[in-house]
Amino acid sequence: MDNTVSIIKCDDYKHCYDGVKTALGLIGGIERYVHKGDRVVIKPNLVSKKRPESAVTTNPAFVNAVVRIAEEAGSIVTIAESPGGPYNQAMLKAVYRACGMDKAIEGTSAKLNFDTGFTETEYKDGHTIKRMPIINPVLDADVIISLPKLKTHAMTSYTGAVKNLFGVIPGTYKAEMHFRLDDRAAFCSMLVDLCERVRPALSIMDAITGMEGDGPTSGQDRFVGLVMASANPYALDLAASAVIGYDASEVDTVRISSERGHIPPSADMLDIRGENINSVKISDFIKPESHFNLLKLINLPPALNSMLVNKLSSRPKMEYDKCVSCGECARCCPPHAISMDTGRPVIDKSKCIRCFCCQELCPKSAVKIARPLLNKFMVKFIK
Ligand code: SF4
Ligand code: SF4
């Protein structure tokens, strides 16, 4: 696979058209990937109803820049996403509006997708899943352009080009995947299967303002000032996760992509164009609390590991002063571990699979990640 990744400095969204254009120029230009008359689906990260300034979703100015560039190459563009929660027209409308997608298509011929159909597809080469439901606009497209946002992620540590494609799985099927694949490595292997099946032609990362801490929705915005692009989504993730301080072995999607031969084992071995990757790395980018996994560091026998997992792992914790009792966390919880019987959310720890969907989809950022004191102390001690 092509291991070329371009990295361009871009200080603000006002200038992101130029940033994206330059980043694409360094990997062959848009004409290499998009041709006149192609039906192009642009897949931003629109995980939930969040305003652009919250740095949760791909910025509308960034989406607009890519739409314009794809249209200049003569393509017909649709923006498509299945956000967290139910996949219906009302939800799509609300998410598009909150995330500024109406603005993103202003002055262009692009359309927002409202077709909520999907098709069960086969992927015989999948390591973890061989069948997957995929939303129809993605299956009908000639070219898929993925627009991930540079962020941390409570469950997978980092979310980028590969993880962005989880949004082609329709609505509540995502919860089913979480439930079936409650082990983080298995879940990430499924994400790599999905990316292999979808095969985006291009992945262009909005790394102008990223998110650190407890991403993907409850962390803090962090200026990064970059646009990154690649035809190889796995290479883009290897480079972008290195920029925010991860070693390839620390991010399961990256590690698995490397084990499958999609990328080399280290970002130093990529063909980076534009900025020198070492000069744009951010050494103090804050990782999510859940990333510090004591059990991974001490590597216990499986039986002992499963005995201690509930005591030592990070887990979601409700902050009731912020909670508005909307029940969204209970609805999205894959194993139904959250009860609203008392009028406010209560987690049954014995059922929780630590997928952090509740933290991801809480509209009030009222779900925090709590790391047991012993875990904090031991990780510090061991490191
Ligand atoms: S989603 Fe958030 S605000 Fe809504 S009930 Fe759950 S914790 Fe409370
Ligand atoms: S309580 Fe939260 S972290 Fe636990 S299984 Fe439910 S959604 Fe996942």
Image (spheres, rainbow, N blue to C red):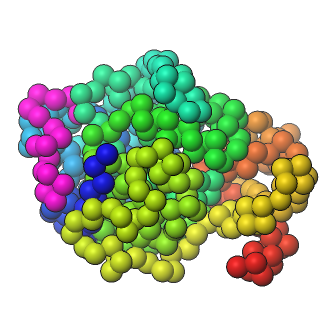
Can residue 280 be spotted in the picture?
Answer: yes
Q: On the image, which quarter does residue 268 sit in?
A: bottom left
| Residue for point 62% across, 66% down | 288
Question: Would you say 69 lies left or right of 140 here?
Answer: left
Q: Residue 124's x, y, as percent?
A: 49, 22
- Which quadrant of the rendered structure holds the C terminus? bottom right
Q: Considering the image in quadrants, where does the N terminus appear?
A: top left
- Camera-side residue: 30 or 346? 30
**Is 135 left or right of 212, judged from the image as shown?**
left
Give me the residue at 51% from left, 49% from top.
Answer: 259
* Residue located at (68% from left, 59% from top): 366
> In this rendering, is residue 34 above or below 234?
above
- Left/right of residue 171 with respect to residue 7 in the rendered view: right
Residue drawn where x is 77% and y is 36% of the image: 336
Total count of labels: 0
Left or right: where 8 falls relative to 339: left
Q: Position of residue 67 (x, y in %)?
A: 20, 45
Q: Quadrant of residue 107?
A: top left
Please state the extent of the stretch shown in magenta in the rendering. 24-40
Q: Is residue 305 above or below residue 133?
A: below
Q: Position of residue 316 (x, y in %)?
A: 74, 56
Magenta stretch: residue 323 in it?
Answer: no
Q: Is residue 274 above or below residue 350?
A: below
44 vs 48, nearest the viewer: 44
Tell me residue 305's x, y (percent). 85, 54
Taking the magenta stretch, the answer to whether it contains residue 29 is: yes
Q: Is residue 153 visible?
A: no
Q: Nearer the viewer, residue 340 or 380?
A: 380
